[in-house]
DNA sequence: TTCATATCTCAATATCTCTTGAAATGTTGA
DNA sequence: TCAACATTTCAAGAGATATTGAGATATGAA
């Protein structure tokens, strides 16, 4: 997942799909949004899906992509717990964000 | 930073340095811990430092590396806020971790 | 000064990743 | 069936990244 997110175009895709929420967006939509050709968009969408950041579902002639919220949350969780052992200095950075929800 | 973390050896380095805390560890120490030759360890430590994940300080003949907690916390914060717009499903994943600190 | 230690730098090679454009696949409606 | 649309697949080339081993640099101690 870190690898999938370490690319400008893919990061834009994720931000857009998170905004779209459950509704998601078609491959063409996403491609236009991030100014990528269809094959380029497809390449990056495939990479994100392989990494588990997003998921896809065919809806008639389009393919709808959605952010995979569970897995993105899991990545944050991995960073906080497994990777950083719930280190207080790191937890402190996002305490405010969490409390406001 | 995502790029820096998207590599097995470097992820191991970060986990180790987070464990070491403020004390940090020397380049040789880190290299041994992750089973990397000196030049390989140096290469990856440099990459992590360039990305802001860790920082270094010379202590006589060794160079001590430490996790950069502010920046790692900043990355989590970026994921939660900027990237994911404080999406509730994603925040929920680490709510428990935060509350326990 | 000289030696041993700790770390980095460099060059060569191998491997992976990104981009492009053309062609293939699958889907719908006339 | 045929045309158009939406998306993917493929091959080629450019560029980035990882690994290795040899050598350079810097530090401390005898």
Image (tube, coloured by chain):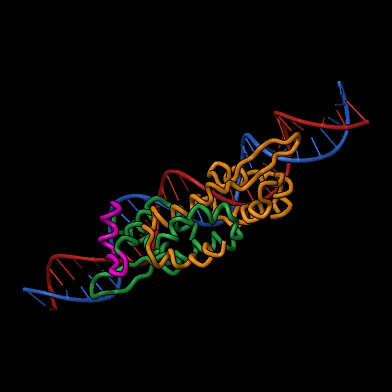
Chain colours: A orange, B green, C red, D blue
For residue B29: magenta? yes
Quadrant housing residue D6: top right
A61 and B94: which one is in front?
A: B94
A87 and D20: which one is in front?
A: A87
Quadrant housing residue B14: bottom left
For residue A46: magenta? no
Q: How many marks?
A: 0
Residue A50 in the figure: left or right of residue D18: right
Q: Residue at x 49, y 49 (%)?
A: A74
Question: Looking at the figure, which quarter contains the C terminus of chain B?
Answer: bottom left
Quadrant housing residue A92: bottom left
Residue A7 in the figure: left or right of residue B65: right
Residue B49 place in picture, x, y as percent: 41, 66
Above or below, A17 against B51 in this view is above
Q: Residue at x 57, y 61 (%)?
A: A101
Above or below, B5 against B22 in this view is above
Residue B78 in the figure: left or right of residue A66: left
Instruction: Give the main secondary structure of the magenta stretch.
Output: helix
Residue A97 place in picture, x, y as percent: 54, 65
D27 and A79: which one is in front?
A: A79
Residue C30 place in picture, x, y as percent: 93, 31
Above or below, D23 against B12 in this view is below
Q: Residue at x 63, y 53 (%)?
A: A18
Residue B27 place in picture, x, y as percent: 29, 63
Q: Residue at x 70, y 44 (%)?
A: A27
Please state the extent of the stretch shown in magenta in the rendering: B21-36
């Amino acid at each position: 997942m870190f690898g999938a997110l370490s690319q400008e175009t893919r990061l834009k895709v994720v931000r857009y799909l998170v905004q779209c929420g459950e509704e998601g967006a078609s491959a063409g939509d996403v491609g236009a949004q991030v100014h990528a050709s269809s094959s380029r968009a497809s390449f990056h969408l495939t990479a994100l899906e392989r990494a588990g950041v997003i998921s896809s579902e065919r809806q008639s002639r389009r393919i709808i992509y959605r952010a995979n919220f569970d897995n993105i949350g899991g990545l944050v969780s991995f960073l906080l717990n497994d990777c950083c052992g719930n280190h207080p200095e790191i937890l402190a950075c996002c305490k405010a964000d969490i409390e406001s929800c």
